[in-house]
Image (cartoon, grey):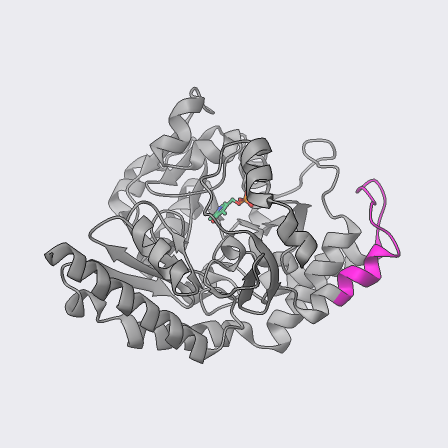
Amino acid sequence: MTERLSVDYMALEAAHSSGVYAKRALTIVRGEGAYLWDAEGNRYIDCVGGQGAANVGHCHPKVVAAIQAQAGVLLSCPELFYNDQRALLLQKLTRLAAMPRAFLCNSGAEAVEAALKFAKFATKRTEVVATMRGFHGRTMGALSATWEPKYREPFAPLVPNYQHVPFNDLAAAEAAITEQTAAVLVEVVQGEGGVRPADGDYLRGLQALCRERGALFIVDEVQTGFGRTGRMFAHQHYALAPDLMPVAKSIAGGVPFGACLIGERVGALQPAIHGTTFGGNPLGCAAALAAIDVLIEEDLSARAAALGDFLMARLGDLPRRFRAQVREVRGLGLLFGIELRGKVAPVLKALQARGVLALPAGLNVLRLLPPLVIAQADLEQVARAIESVLEELGAAAIE
Ligand SMILES: *Cc1c(COP(=O)(O)O)cnc(C)c1O
């Protein structure tokens, strides 16, 4: 502890980090379940949830044990060989998703990138339709599908033949999807784009249009997957059958890992059209096997649904109670968003001072993404902290 405090980690990072992240003045050194601790030993209730990577909770003992065991056996094994952990994970993951095959990788952007390449390869078409406010990652292909101009503009020109249609607008999609469309890419709940749930009819309509016009239907479940929204995968709320499904974030209990699930309509892929050195590495596979077991054994999807209902019952009337500060409350399961009338940054700061860490989604949405193992009593604490911050801000606005 004393040694930790003798090093100024914040100054070290500030001096040598890339500069692409706006950081909060907080050094996190430990996590357990839904709690995080800073370098001074202060405990926080975590509603950042590793930005979606910590659904099973920080340092879940079963995930930790699996990583420790595998670390002493085999760390590297590229996919030019078969591997025991990988074989078992592919079986578990494809059964869970009810999709026959999967490409394994290391992050969400890579999983999206794989989906886009596979769609182009399989359809021999070049056009991609994505949605306004959609977020799919920062690599050039995934970025081309991402909407936010401030992420895109510095890097133009991006991949050609991508277009963005208004979200939840089936008529606009119908006009955009043609016989040239390789893929339509959508989130069931737009996470980074402001916690905006899609309508079931819209998603079913998109899927039908894809089937009709020969495009592949890509559902990006990087943030919504693995129990977050109250089902193992969010598209199960609407009985969808994606052709390609990128997943990542919580797939391996916090270890970097991703996958692109591949449906029947994609057809055969060929050796050498895609690949990655660390894809399907035994350490990540062992962690993912353990994390998926935990999700199932602890029924964390049902827990997310129940706790999401609790939060909505507890905070759903914020727009009425805090009319001047809150525009709307929305979400699905434990992907929860509070749209403010003003900026979210001061709210995040005030919550941190009250021992609660939360996320933004854009400039004015407060996003809660707690580990699904969070105690209801802790969510009650979070709700009280939010009310107290809104009261304080309301009082400040009147002064
Ligand atoms: C986070 C996210 C990504 C990108 O994942 P990374 O692991 O950060 O590359 C892609 N799609 C969605 C929906 C996400 O939320």
The N terminus is located in which quarter? bottom right
Quadrant of the rendered image containing residue 29: bottom right
Residue toward you, 397 or 376: 397
Give the farthest residue toward the top: 157
Residue 181 visible in the picture: no
The image position of residue 91, as x and y in percent, is 72, 61
Give yes or no for residue 285 being in the magenta stretch.
no
394 w.r.t. 7: above or below: below
Give the farthest residue toward the left: 398
Q: What stretch is highlighted in magenta?
A: 65-84
Give yes or no for residue 80 being in the magenta stretch.
yes
237 w.r.t. 101: above or below: below
Residue 224 visible in the picture: yes
The image position of residue 373, as x and y in percent, is 54, 73
The C terminus is located in which quarter? bottom left
The image position of residue 257, as x and y in percent, is 65, 50
Give the farthest residue toward the right: 73
Identify the residue at horizontal 70%, vertical 70% (top origin). 61
**What number of labels is visible?**
0
* Side of 141 where 237 appears, left or right: left
Quadrant of the rendered image containing residue 130: top left
167 w.r.t. 354: above or below: above
* Side of 241 where 165 appears, left or right: left
Identify the residue at horizontal 31%, vertical 42% (top origin). 173
Identify the main secondary structure in magenta: loop
Identify the residue at horizontal 53%, vertical 33% (top origin). 139
* Side of 33 where 315 appears, left or right: left
The image position of residue 100, as x and y in percent, is 65, 55
Identify the residue at horizontal 51%, vertical 29% (top origin). 140
